[in-house]
Image: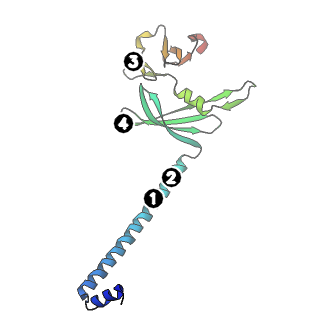
Amino acid sequence: MTNKEKYKQAFSVLHSSDDLVLEVEKMMTIKKRAAVKAAAILAGACMLMAGGSSIAYAKDVGGIQRTIQLWLEGELTDVTVTFKHDPTGSYEVSYLGKDGAIHEFGGGGIAYEKDGTERPLTESELMEEMNAPDVRYLEDGTVWIYYYDQEIEITDRFENGVCYAKVSNGDETLYMTILYQDGWGASPHKYLSPDDMR
């Protein structure tokens, strides 16, 4: 007689009570229900994720969307940039401002090749545009230049509606000519003439 047979013979006289059998069956039923609920919840979550990703994809049709950091108003800020692949080579930027609101701006343009043909700006050219100085006219009447981590007030530097300012990011120096509420220009070599800008 083997050990297995000896165990069977020893325990054959023992019988489980009907209550115990009923309890085990009840636990198995509860376990099956929990598994079904978990499967249903998992399936629902998968459907939501699939639906959400198709919505996000549909929103981004026609461009490449990236999250990057830009210097805005003197602070490094997380922004979402959508580069459009259209004939104007445009982009759209959205970010959460200091005031807690979502702000948006855009830009773009075309470049002319040596043979006179035009093409949309590349993503690197658009990034250069986004990193350019920013001149802001605030509600309190002050005028500011924002360039990388710099915030320069130029309100009192206008003479005959023109202000000259030099800014640098450490690698590049720009000479800015600002026409009061009429645009501005910059050059890495010299200040631009106001007459050439009009």
Residue at disc 4, secondary structure: loop
From the image, state whether disc 3 or disc 4 is nearer to you. Answer: 4
The mark that comes first in sequence, 2 or 1, is 1
**Disc 2 secondary structure class:** helix
Q: Residue furthest right?
A: 115
Alpha carbon of mark 3 to alpha carbon of mark 4: how far?
22 Å
Q: Which mark is residue 55?
A: 2
Helix, strand or loop status at disc 3: loop
Pick out the residue farthest to the top.
159
Residue drawn at (32%, 75%) of the image: 30
Q: Which residue is mark 4?
A: 100
In percent of width and height, residue 156 lies at 41, 10
The answer for how far apart the CA atoms under marks 2 and 1 are is 10 Å
Disc 1 and disc 3: Cα gap in Å? Answer: 49 Å
Label 2 – label 3 distance at C-alpha: 42 Å
Do callouts 2 and 4 mark residues in contact (Cβ within 8 Å)? Answer: no
